Amino acid sequence: MFEPKDLVGTIWLAPEAHSRTTIDRFGKISLKTGKNIYVEFLSENQGVFSIKIHWWNVEAKINVVEYAVMAHENENVYVYVEAEHPDDSSFPGISAGGNFTLLSETEAEMTQIGRLLNGSASAFITRLEKVSAAPDIPIKQSYPPIK
C-alpha cells in the first residue's frame, strides 16, 4: 500500500470529532466529546517516524500539539508513543500511545490508550482521512504554551 517514505509529509484528519472514554480507580466512567484531531508525518529515519498529533475542541478552548515516535508493527499497522508530559503541566489529555492503521491509501484508523494526569485510564478510536493540508484552527494553541 505505502512505502514508509511515502508517508512523510502526509496529513491525516478526522472528518468528525471523537469521544474519549475514561475510567478512574473507583470504576467511575466518563465520556468527553467534541475533540478534533489530525496526525502529520514529519520525518522518517530507518523506519522510525516522527509525528505531530494536533487536537482541539473549540467550545472548551483547547488546542494541543503533541509529538510522538512511530514504528511499523505489522502489515499496515504502526505503533506510536507520545512524549511524556510533566505531572505539573496541567496537560488536558491522555499521556499515551496507540496504533495507526492504514485502511487504504486515503483512510486510516487511530487508536489511543493511556492515562490522564490523575491516573485514570482513557482511550479513543477515530477514523482519519488523508488531506492535502492541515485545517485552520480558530483558537490559539493552549498546550504546550507558546513562548
Image: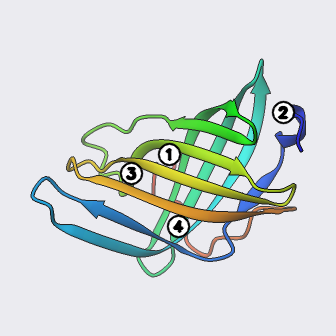
Instruction: Determine contact: label 2, label 4, CB under 8 Å.
Output: no
Distance CA(mark 3)–CA(mark 1): 23 Å
Tag of residue 89: none
Q: Position of residue 19 (x, y in %)?
A: 45, 71
Which one is nearer the viewer's eye here, 5 or 147?
Answer: 5
- Mark 3 closeness class: few <14, some 14–19, many ≥20 residues within 10 Å: many
Task: Please state which amino acid type lies under the numbered disc 2.
Answer: Pro
Q: Residue at x 43, y 43 (%)?
A: 96
Distance CA(mark 4)–CA(mark 1): 19 Å
Give the mark nearest the N terminus, 4 or 1. Answer: 4
Distance CA(mark 1)–CA(mark 2): 33 Å
Q: Residue under circle 3?
A: 94
Tag of residue 4: 2
Q: Position of residue 27 (x, y in %)?
A: 14, 61
Q: Residue at x 32, y 36 (%)?
A: 86
**Residue 142, placed above or below residue 73:** below
Q: Position of residue 132 (x, y in %)?
A: 87, 62
Residue 131 in sight here:
yes
Q: Residue at x 72, y 49 (%)?
A: 40
